[in-house]
Image (cartoon, grey):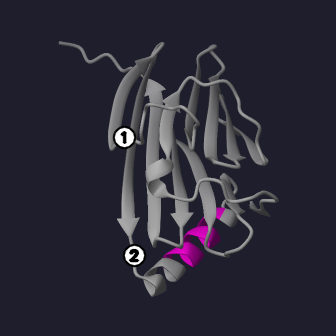
Amino acid sequence: MLTILNTTYTDTRAADLAWALGREPLPALAALDLELAGAKLQLRLLGASHQVLLEEERGGHCSETVACIPGSSTPLPLGVAKRVGDWEYEFAARVEVLSPGSFAGRAQELLALVSDHPHGLAGVFPGSPHAFTAMLAQRYEGQVHWRTWHAYPQDGQLVATRTRVGVRVSVPL
């Protein structure tokens, strides 16, 4: 699903992004509710980037926020591995710096991929067709995965994140 976000572009630098786990739902400009084999997932586009809310039928829940969070002291990490209740949570982020031509091509490719996907949500900010946040989710081998992309065309930066959440699997000794 592709939407035009009717708001000012507030997260204007990749370096301003922060990561938070467990935050309450923030006001969303657009949301996509998904049911993925017993997991309820809500992808949320914020004026300042994204939030994902996950709830399993067995009662577990998880909230991930990557956004410009005023007063946040947790910058965007390269990687996180945490235990959240009975789940294992893994997060990774990277910043790609692209030339203007490469950036435009990559932006078009990602927006086409996400907007045509039944588990995808993308929002374009006013002012540039390449200023966007995009999210894509899937369930694979009993785990929920999502990827996000945050585009900063003025700097040629694309922030890509990937998250995996799943029940901890005990390995017999």
Say which residue appears at 63% left-offset and 63% top-offset.
Answer: 132
**Left or right: 88 as drawn, with respect to 145:** left
Q: Is residue 138 magenta?
A: no
Q: Is residue 6 visible?
A: yes
Give the main secondary structure of the magenta stretch: helix
Can you tell which mark lies on residue 98? Answer: 2
Q: Is residue 154 above or below residue 168?
A: below
Say which residue appears at 64% left-offset and 48% top-offset.
Answer: 48
Q: Is residue 14 above or below residue 138?
A: below
Near-viewer residue (142 or 147):
147
Bounds of the magenta segment? 106-114
Q: Is residue 37 visible?
A: no
Q: Is residue 113 magenta?
A: yes
Can you tell which mark lies on residue 77? Answer: 1
Say which residue appears at 61% left-offset and 58% top-offset.
Answer: 134
Residue 67 lies in what quarter of the image? top right
Quick one: SS at disc 2? loop
* Residue 66 at x, y percent in the picture: 54, 42
Q: Earlier in the sequence, mark 2 or mark 1?
A: 1
In the picture as drawn, the residue positioned furthest to the right comes out as 6
